[in-house]
Image (cartoon, rainbow, N blue to C red):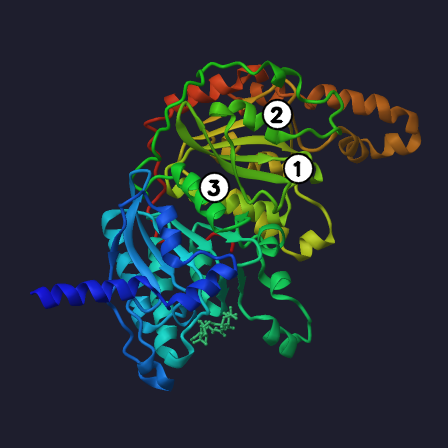
Amino acid sequence: MGNRNKELKSKRRKALMGGGKARVDAQHEKNKLTARERLALLLDENSFEEWDIFVEHRSDSFGLDKQKFFGDGVVTGYGKINGRLVFVYSQDFTVLGGSLSEANAKKICKIMDQAMKVGAPIIGLNDSGGARIQEGVASLGGYADIFQRNVMASGVVPQLSLIMGPCAGGAVYSPAITDFIGMVKSTSNMFVTGPNVVKTVTHESVTAEELGGSHTHTSKSGVADFECENDLELIELIKKLFSYLPSNNKEKAPITPTKDKLNRKVLALDSVIPENPSIPYDMCEILINILDDKNFFEVQEKYAKNIIIGFGRICGESIGIVANQPKFLAGCLDIDASKKAARFIRFCDAFNIPIITFVDVPGFMPGLRQELGGIIKNGAKLLYAYAESTVPKITIITRKAYGGAYDVMSSKHLRGDVNLAWPTAEIAVMGAKGAVEVIFKSEVAEDGSKTEQLVKSYEEKFLNPFEAAKLGFLDDIIKPSETRGRIAKSLEMLKNKDLKNPWRKHGNIPL
Ligand code: HXC
């Protein structure tokens, strides 16, 4: 027995060394933490229970039989974040470049299966050279086994991805299916094919950073949601994100107690909307002032800035926020904004997080680029996401709600539960000038001086919230300073909302 204990101790010690000192030093030199250091920062102290520390690969191709490491390049198990259970896998770049083998894929699948059985989130820390090249198709099979589980877990338990090193080839498709992706500046990248293949196939010369760095994916492609300076910053951010989420689709997000008063008035909001409707303002300021303790956790901050998405709380309850941002492109809905908001709405709906929508939208973005890019199908994604969602939906129109965009932005017609407007709201088919040019075309052509008078009369009739309120499309017109209290009361009223969509295998969202 004494010998067995010794053997166990020695094997465990070996496993904890990963790929050995030289490789760990190389990892640190690249400003990267090791797989185990990352988990130690992510999980509550002493909460980590590791599984499969003694797993080894079974391949003998290309000398692999002489390169065996306990754990085989991925650390897996479960632990707690602020007392809440999560399952984790952390790829160990110091062991064969964290490459994915058949054995190491099985370890990942095992914890994914267990997470599904107990209804706990799955968090993946990615740092890998991709498929273990020596293993060939066995490794590819491992990836597909993970993809299948990612899809089955989608909408059942939250799945979060931290990209902390290379993530290339088909390997990118596992994080792509997960709910949120965070990347570390300079040390992480994601691409389907690297710069060398790109050069050969398309003759384009690009750096890995341009092709798949954190800036590219958080501001241009929209593939990733967060960009952080280093491993530690990303881990802290993911913990914060997790605090807004429930553990699974049958639970609600935890309540975070606050001293912020339910009825706190924000007097500054009564004068936040400029007199001139063409002048922009910062919608973020409104959101921050309304939320508990002025905390707004923005998602995809640098991508499609004309729409804002993120999490906050009101009276301790986690809420998802979608808001047009008049500061960028006048808050127009374009392809990127529609996709960004639609995916976020579907996440909130899947995980019982009420959706609060702030509207100031002059319409869908016109133009050839948008039409050729498929604004019709992409805009429909946003409409579809709002229409199918069954969580509590509260809408506040601060200023413009024009045309189709009025319908789309969580209107009463798309089963908005509580639809409110500020007195500055303008709910109309279009802006007054455009409307006059269409309906009084001949009068204006005959006598241009009439335009101003006609614009004024159209503005008086339609550019206000009263017409919509008259039709019952708005439940009330409220003082901006009272918005927080009105949302809080609405959320309380909606606590037991029970709305179900008709049975179907699944809908056919315009992808
Ligand atoms: C086996 C690998 C590996 C891999 C890296 N290593 N990637 N071993 N399979 N995929 C090993 C290296 O041989 C090396 O071992 C150690 O890990 C560290 O790698 P380095 O190259 O020294 O590190 P670095 O210079 O930082 O470069 C990292 C890298 C590079 C950019 C990731 O290693 C690389 O280009 N790797 C190959 C990437 C790739 O083509 N993967 C397959 C993609 S296709 P030693 O013993 O020398 O230290 C794919 C298909 C998935 O993934 C499809 C799913 C559907």
Would the CB of label 2 be found within 8 Å of ligand 1? no
Q: Which of the labelled discs sits on residue 331, or is there none?
A: 1
Please state which of residues 149 and 410 is positioned toward the viewer in this rendering: 149
> Mark 1: which secondary structure?
helix
Q: Within 10 angstroms of label 2, few (less than 14), some, or many (20 or more) residues?
A: many
Residue holding disc 2: 398
Distance of label 1 from label 3 (alpha carbons): 18 Å
Report which quarter residue 191 is drawn in. Answer: bottom right
Residue 374 position in % (x across, y down): 63, 55
Q: Do we see residue 151 in this rendering?
A: no
> Mark 2: which secondary structure?
strand
At x 28%, y 57%, the residue is 111
Q: Amino acid at mark 2?
A: Thr
> Mark 3: which secondary structure?
helix
- In the figure, 297 relative to 476: above or below? below
Please state which of residues 332 and 246 is positioned toward the viewer in this rendering: 246
At x 55%, y 45%, the residue is 300
Residue 167 position in % (x across, y down): 48, 64
Q: Amino acid at mark 3?
A: Ile
Residue holding disc 3: 345
Task: Point out the tag, 1 or 3, that comes first from the N-terminus.
Answer: 1
Distance of label 2 from label 3 (alpha carbons): 20 Å
Q: Within 10 angstroms of label 1, few (less than 14), some, or many (20 or more) residues?
A: many
Task: Point out the tag, 2 or 1, that comes first from the N-terminus.
Answer: 1
